[in-house]
Image (spheres, rainbow, N blue to C red):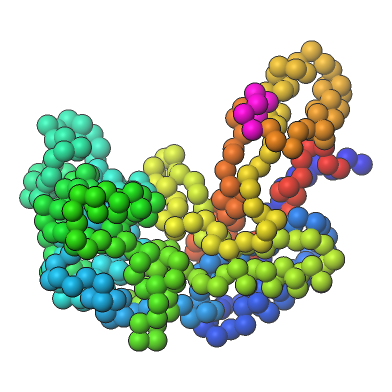
């Protein structure tokens, strides 16, 4: 009988993890028990995915506000710094701002408008369009911005982020602009807080004469007074753990996924893949928010997950080449066409409409949607059939 089900994504429940737990054993046992209890057959190229939060918590990869403040003072020698283009987030950024304020420095909180880097609005876009303000050149202070935006609150959280950030950092002024170079009108010491534009922004500021420029991935890259750290991403990928502590992005992830892969291959006799995932890489078309607040979707993955898909667009071929065939003929012709496709389809018409993104970004997005961010309790995701196609039975 022909196979009638394609890709399947299944959340796997685990015990509640805390620092010091043997996560490798817990992930292994959780997957094996789930497979056995549900009579699941493991196949080559199945993917076992573990959320980054689970890894970081087991590692104890945390830092306190005091430890972060100390590293800020290690990096910046002056008595004031600009906090340039942070995202609007209680979970992601407010705790960091609290830590920066503990440095004792005066803070210039510089917000982009009408929205932040990942799509959180700080004002109604229509109010901007109907004003005389030019967002590409105009620098607004808080009073001017309030006249423009009023007491705008975030659509989903109901939070006035301007008020929240000022409460978190009383020794601060808030400025609103979109040209990164405008920050130099306030100070030449800048902490770039954007995620995906940080390298370009740093280069632009250094070329424009800034004296001290760091980005979030350069803070907490080594242990401060026994803290956790991440040498590659620093504070990027972190989020609130308690009112005074942040959980950092996990470290040493490659060793973790490689060792788990060995254990699963030995257990199941199949070439499974393993990855760590964080935020998915997708945008909500209604809320306009880009989900990816982590620096990458997957900080560690096994080698079989490298690259991008090499897929034909079934709809394009069916509408053009096979449109005059019977349903039976076009079905068989499509299976044969896919089974014999070129190993490199890049740039050909028959790929029009496919998604040439990194495989780990696609898988991580699927995992993020499967596990959710709340109380599902499935921080492991088992994906089957992702690398199959219409020609596989």
Residue at (16, 59) in percent of width and height = 188
Q: Residue at x 75, y 61 (%)?
A: 272
In the image, farthest residue toward the right:
1
Q: Is residue 257 left or right of residue 149?
A: right
Q: Could you say where residue 48 lies in the image, as x and y percent from the top left?
A: 68, 62
Residue 156 magenta-highlighted: no
Pick the front one: 208 or 226: 208
Q: Residue furthest left?
A: 143
Question: Based on the displayed image, in which of its 4 quarters is residue 96 positioned?
Answer: bottom left
Residue that lies at the very extreme toward the top in this rendered image: 324
**Residue 369 shows in this picture:** no
- As drawn, is 146 to the left or to the right of 50? left
The answer to whether 107 appears left or right of 381 in the picture is: left
**Residue 321 versus residue 289 in the image, above or below:** above
Please state the horizontal and vertical placement of residue 70, each as a whole percent of the image: 26, 79
As drawn, 226 above or below 185:
below
- Of residue 244 and residue 149, the one placed in the foreground of this image is 244
Number of disc labels:
0
Image point (18%, 53%), residue name: 209
Res. 12 image quadrant: bottom right
Vertical order, 313 against 63 (above or below):
above
| Quadrant that contains the N terminus | top right
**Relative to 78, 243 lies left or right:** right
Identify the image quadrant of the C terminus: top right
Please say if 156 is above or below 236: above
Residue at 81%, 57% (x, y): give it. Answer: 43
Residue 7 visible:
yes
- Point out the stretch of residues depicted in magenta: 346-351
Percent from the top left, x then y, of residue 26? Answer: 66, 78
């Amino acid at each position: 009988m022909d196979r009638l089900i394609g890709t399947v994504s299944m959340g796997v429940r685990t015990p509640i993890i805390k620092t010091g737990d043997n996560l490798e054993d817990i992930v292994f046992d959780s997957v094996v028990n789930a497979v056995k209890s549900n009579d699941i057959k493991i196949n080559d190229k199945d993917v076992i995915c573990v959320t980054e939060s689970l890894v970081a918590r087991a590692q104890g990869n945390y830092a306190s506000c005091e430890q972060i403040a100390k590293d800020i003072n290690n990096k910046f020698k002056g008595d004031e710094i600009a906090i340039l283009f942070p995202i609007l987030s209680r979970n992601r950024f407010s705790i960091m701002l609290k830590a920066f304020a503990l440095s004792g420095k005066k803070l210039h909180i510089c917000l982009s408008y009408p929205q932040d880097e990942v799509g959180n609005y700080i004002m109604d876009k229509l109010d901007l369009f109907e004003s005389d303000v030019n967002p590409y050149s105009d620098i607004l202070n808080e009073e001017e911005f309030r006249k423009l935006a009023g007491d705008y609150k975030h659509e989903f959280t109901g939070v006035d982020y301007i008020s929240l950030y000022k409460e978190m950092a009383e020794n601060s002024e808030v400025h609103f602009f979109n040209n990164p170079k405008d920050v130099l009108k306030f100070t030449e010491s800048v902490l770039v807080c954007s995620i995906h534009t940080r390298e370009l922004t740093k280069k632009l500021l250094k070329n424009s004469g800034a004296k001290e420029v760091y980005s979030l991935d350069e803070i907490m890259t080594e242990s401060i007074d026994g803290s956790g750290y991440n040498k590659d991403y620093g504070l990027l990928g972190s989020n609130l753990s308690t009112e005074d502590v942040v959980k950092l992005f996990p470290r040493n992830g490659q060793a973790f996924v490689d060792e788990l892969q060995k254990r699963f291959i030995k257990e199941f006799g199949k070439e499974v893949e393993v990855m760590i995932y964080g935020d998915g890489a997708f945008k909500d078309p209604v809320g306009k928010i880009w989900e990816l607040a982590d620096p990458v979707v997957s900080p560690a993955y096994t080698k079989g997950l490298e690259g991008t898909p090499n897929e034909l667009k079934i709809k394009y071929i069916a509408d053009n080449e096979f449109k005059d065939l019977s349903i039976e003929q076009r079905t068989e012709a499509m299976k044969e066409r896919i089974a014999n496709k070129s190993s490199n389809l890049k740039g050909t018409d028959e790929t029009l409409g496919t998604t040439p993104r990194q495989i780990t970004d696609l898988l991580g997005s699927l995992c993020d949607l499967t596990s959710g961010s709340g109380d599902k309790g499935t921080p492991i995701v088992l994906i089957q059939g992702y690398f199959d196609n219409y020609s596989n039975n």
